[in-house]
Image (tube, helix red, strand yellow):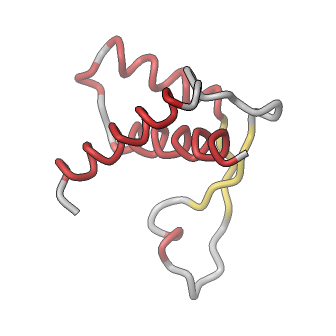
Amino acid sequence: MKLRGLENCVGILVRLARERGVDGVMLPDSDGYWTITTPAWTKIYEDPEPAVGSFSDDVEGLNKLLSNPERASSVDLERVALLLRLLSDQLAF
């Protein structure tokens, strides 16, 4: 998928959330989550080592990105992906 198409999909889905009355991503009561790090998460026939992440750390990192866009990195894409997953959970339930 081209980046333009991905960008358009994210925009459509954010608008869907707004239309359903969502104005922010609700963080769960528990701050931690399990994740499988890159590149292990795509190697389904291996036994990956899970890592622990923090939603509050992710939000803090993204707020820093908003105030200083020049610091953008692939880690910020992972942070956005995790918050989009939470948004998906909000819309599903």
User: Considering the image in quadrants, where does the N terminus appear?
Assistant: bottom left
Depicted 18 relative to depicted 74: above or below = above
Relative to residue 62, is residue 31 drawn left or right? right
- Residue nearest the observer in this picture, 27 or 49: 27
Relative to residue 2, is residue 23 drawn left or right? right
Depicted 9 relative to depicted 18: above or below = below
Residue 84 x/y as whole percent: 51, 42
Relative to residue 87, is residue 73 drawn left or right? left
Which of the 4 image quarters holds residue 24?
top right
Looking at the rendered structure, the number of numbered marks drawn on it comes to 0
Residue 12 x/y as whole percent: 35, 41
Residue most extreme to the front: 19
- Residue nearest the observer in this picture, 67 or 81: 81
Residue 41 x/y as whole percent: 53, 68
Residue 37 x/y as whole percent: 54, 59
Residue at image point 49% right, 39% down: 79
Residue at image point 45% right, 45% down: 78
Residue most extreme to the right: 29
User: Considering the image in quadrants, where does the C terminus appear?
Assistant: top right
Residue most extreme to the top: 67
Residue at image point 50% right, 79% down: 43
Residue most extreme to the bottom: 45
Residue at image point 58% right, 26% down: 22
